[in-house]
Amino acid sequence: MIFAKQALTATGWGKNIRISVRGGRILTVSPDQTPQATDVQVDVLLPALANLHSHSFQRAMAGMTEHRKAGKDSFWTWRDMMYRFTKHLTPEHIEAIAALVFMEMQEAGYASVGEFHYVHHQPDGTAYDDLGELSARIAAAAADTGIGLTHLPVLYTYGGAGQAPLQAGQARFGNTVDRFNALSARARAIVATLPDDCQVGIAPHSLRATCPDDLVAVLQAHDAGPVHIHIAEQPKEVADIAGWLSARPVEWLLQNADVSTDWCLIHATHMTSGETQNMAKSGAVAGLCPITEANLGDGPFNGPTYLLHGGAFGIGSDSNVLISLTEELRTLEYSQRLRDMARNVMVDGEGSIGETLYCGAARGGAQALGRGAGVIAVGEWADLVAIDSADPALCALPAQQLLDGLCFAARDRVITDVWSAGRHCVQAGKHVKSDQITAAYRSAMCSLMSVL
Ligand code: ZN
């Protein structure tokens, strides 16, 4: 049992809440209780967020791409560096990096992750003996850390818009539709060995890395579950797709695919007002990655129009250059304030920004990962996070302002405990396997740096 002095449940803020968990799901939520000796006692309990978009391996190159060279650095020069880095990753590196990343996510307050997984093959593009070798490495990292995994194998067939051939740096990503379907089946078998909350979706990488016929084919082969796609991250991508398909990326996708609540459109940065409205009405989740979008110079999301039309959104750490849930949320709001020269932008009408951001991302993130979670309610997965409201950043705030304090004033140190589907992985602010996972990561990085 978990006892919380305060908790934000599906019915609002309550005091002295006891929660029981069975089979990873919330069995009972009882207010106005007395703690029992065997209870895990925490201060403030919240639904934990899903991190809906991650490429875990990119964590290992954080800090390596912040040096300006002659000419203008851009998303595309960053991508060249990422390709060079990817060439040297072994399966062992990929597993050790993913474990560190998943651990850092849990310590930052995330209970689950959508791993958008596109490095599938050996450096020259040859498949491993087990087509799902690298999916198995991601699953092993999830098993090690206890994070709730939604594994998203990526279809990546072309090197650019108009079915351009893959470049050398993209050889590890490439699959035809048939090989992708075989890989997805293998990934399902691998993830079936994980706890029941873990699952597999699909991720056509982007419109530029696939083509209309292939997109139809993989969607037809996909029974149910999440569909994620990168879209409209960069102006060049919008221009390339418009030149090829005679429509802007989001416009084209909404007209040509049955985009609905199973879908998560990652970034969706460059949209017209009409695209923004239509995407909001589709029921899909906007997968926003504010720290990475700032780091890569993508641009700000069209938040006010999207919220006005009831759009769902969630948060992802994408390149994992910095894993911080609180900083993701405040960066999202600050990007809007800087563009609009206004305050308190990410709310429709009046209300708390912190609550809109946190609760919106909790619901949207869970939706995007196909995960019954995002609120504390009976029957949902027990994805829970506890924070310490006695921290100096929060100690003056009543319950109704705690989420504003968390989003704008607190550091991640206020997070004390995290449960992923009932697995109590973070305790007293630290992952229960922190020492072992960190040591394995350091060792992997030594090995990797010796060949870079
Ligand atoms: Zn991404």
Image (tube, rainbow, N blue to C red):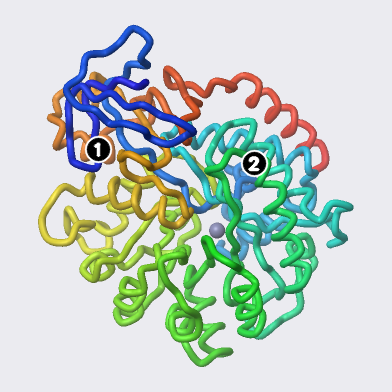
**Picture disc at residue 278:** none
Quarter of the rendering occupied by the C terminus: top right
Quadrant where the N terminus is found in the figure: top left
Residue at x 24%, y 30% (from the top left corner)? 7
Would you place residue 148 above or below residue 6 in this image?
Answer: below
Task: Give the percent coordinates (x, y) of residue 149.
Answer: 56, 45
Q: Where is residue 5 in the image (x, y as percent from the top left)?
A: 22, 21
**452 and 93: which is toward the camera:** 93
Where's residue 269, x and y in %? 41, 68
Along the viewing direction, whichever of 118 and 445 lies nearer the viewer: 118
Disc 2 residue crowd, few under 14, some 14–19, many 20+, Cα 10 Å = many
The residue type indicated by label 1 comes to Thr
For disc 1, the neighbor class at 10 Å (few under 14, some 14 to 19, many from 20) is some
Taking the spot 47% from the left edge, 88% from the top edge, the residue there is: 247
Query: In the drawing, does residue 138 fall left or right of residue 265?
Result: right
Instruction: Determine which residue is flagged by label 2.
Output: 60
Q: Position of residue 280 (x, y in %)?
A: 32, 71
Q: Report if residue 78 is visible in the image.
A: yes
- Name the quadrant containing residue 154: bottom right
Q: In this view, does 131 lie to the left or right of 51?
A: right
Is the residue marked 1 within 8 Å of ligand 1, measured from its CB? no
Q: Which amino acid does label 2 sit on?
A: Ala
Of residue 257 and residue 100, the one placed in the foreground of this image is: 257
- Residue furthest out toward the left: 350
Q: In this view, does 2 lie to the left or right of 178?
A: left
**Disc number for residue 9:** 1
Q: Quick one: label 1 or label 2, which is nearer the N terminus?
A: 1
- Please tell me in which quarter of the rendered image ligand 1 is found: bottom right
**Image quadrant where residue 9 sits:** top left
Residue 69 appears anywhere in the view? no
CB at mark 2 closer than 8 A to ligand 1? no
